[in-house]
């Protein structure tokens, strides 16, 4: 029996993911090498402690403590169903680590729940990828020179505003404008000065518009301002 237990421990210790077992009192009975690597805590520091002792200080994305109030493991042992969550744990060195957690109930030969096993993995790479995707999406709808929304964004935004007219009769107005004799500015003073003129106008339009209006660069020296809550008068 001991050889069998050691065999399974050896298997779990070779997993990249963190794995730990807990009993119904939420006392941690086993802590694998993957858990040590992700958290910085070795097994002797964790085994024997209880989940609610808050050693790892699990919190959700809003900062709410899970170990004290919304523990997925406790829910799993009460309801008998697996649970998943994306949370943050407290590394031994003091920093937060984003992890994906999956908790499954452990049952005895009679089907009674006697504890739970939690498997968790470092989610840092996933969060970094999501952040990069959000950044790329933001850049796709942003004019790189003026930092205003670009024409691609405005096309989608105007479709949404037109839908609001048909659904709720919420009207809006469009101000279309451009810089007079802009080609002469570029030809006389150079494109760098022309770029500065575009950025200056963009800032002026934003600062002179209301917080709920939208200023966008249509293209070249052309700009559009979408003004809400106005009628034709």
Image (spheres, rainbow, N blue to C red):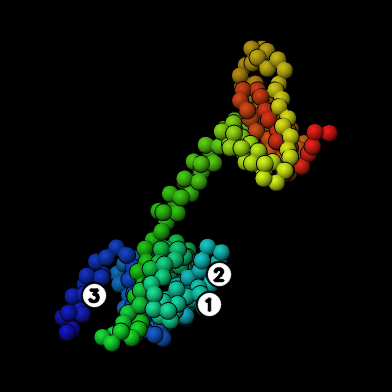
Give the camera-side residue of 175 and 133: 175
Q: Earlier in the sequence, mark 1 or mark 2?
A: 2
Screen quadrant of the N terminus: bottom left
Q: Is residue 127 above or below residue 210?
A: below
Which mark is first along the chain, 1 or 3?
A: 3
Looking at this view, name the residue that lies furthest to the front: 166
Residue 195, can we see it? yes
Name the disc covering residue 59, or none: none
Closer to viewer: mark 3 or mark 1? 1
In the picture provided, is 160 more to the left or to the right than 134? right
Q: Where residue 33 sits in the image (x, y, percent)?
A: 30, 69
Local SS, label 2: loop
Q: Which mark is residue 64?
A: 2
Between circles 3 and 2, the one closer to the viewer is: 2
Q: Residue at x 45, y 63 (%)?
A: 86
Which quadrant of the rendered structure holds the C terminus?
Answer: top right
In 3D space, how far apart are the residues under numbered discs 1 and 2 (Cα atoms)? 9 Å
Q: Residue at x 25, y 70 (%)?
A: 12
The residue beneath circle 1 is 69
Q: Residues within 10 Å of mark 1 (few under 14, many from 20)?
A: few
Q: Residue at x 41, y 63 (%)?
A: 100
Q: Are marks 1 and 2 in contact (CB under 8 Å)?
A: yes
Disc number for residue 9: 3
Assess whether mark 2 and mark 3 are in contact (beta carbons under 8 angstroms). Answer: no
| Chain-order first, disc 3 or disc 2 | 3
The x and y percentages for residue 115 are 35, 82
Distance from disc 3 to disc 2, alpha carbons, whole Å, reads 33 Å
């Amino acid at each position: 029996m001991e050889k069998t237990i050691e065999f399974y421990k050896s298997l779990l210790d070779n997993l990249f993911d963190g794995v730990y077992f807990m009993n119904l009192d939420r006392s941690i009975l086993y802590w694998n090498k993957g858990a040590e690597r992700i958290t910085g805590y070795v097994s002797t520091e964790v085994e024997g402690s209880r989940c609610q002792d808050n050693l790892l200080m699990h919190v959700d994305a809003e900062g709410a403590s899970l170990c004290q109030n919304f523990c997925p493991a406790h829910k799993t042992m009460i309801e008998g169903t697996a649970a998943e969550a994306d949370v943050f744990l407290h590394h031994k060195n003091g920093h937060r680590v984003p992890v994906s957690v999956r908790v499954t109930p452990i049952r005895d030969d009679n089907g009674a729940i006697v504890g739970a096993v939690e498997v968790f993995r470092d989610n840092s790479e996933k969060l970094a990828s999501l952040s990069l995707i959000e950044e790329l999406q933001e850049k796709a709808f942003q004019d790189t020179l003026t930092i205003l929304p670009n024409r691609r964004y405005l096309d989608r935004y105007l479709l949404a505003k037109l839908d609001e007219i048909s659904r709720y009769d919420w009207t809006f107005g469009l101000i279309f404008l451009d810089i007079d004799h802009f080609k002469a500015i570029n030809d006389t003073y150079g494109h760098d000065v022309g770029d500065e003129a575009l950025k200056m106008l963009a800032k002026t339009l934003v600062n002179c518009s209301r917080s709920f209006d939208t200023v966008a660069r249509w293209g070249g020296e052309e700009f559009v301002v979408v003004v809400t809550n106005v009628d034709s008068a």
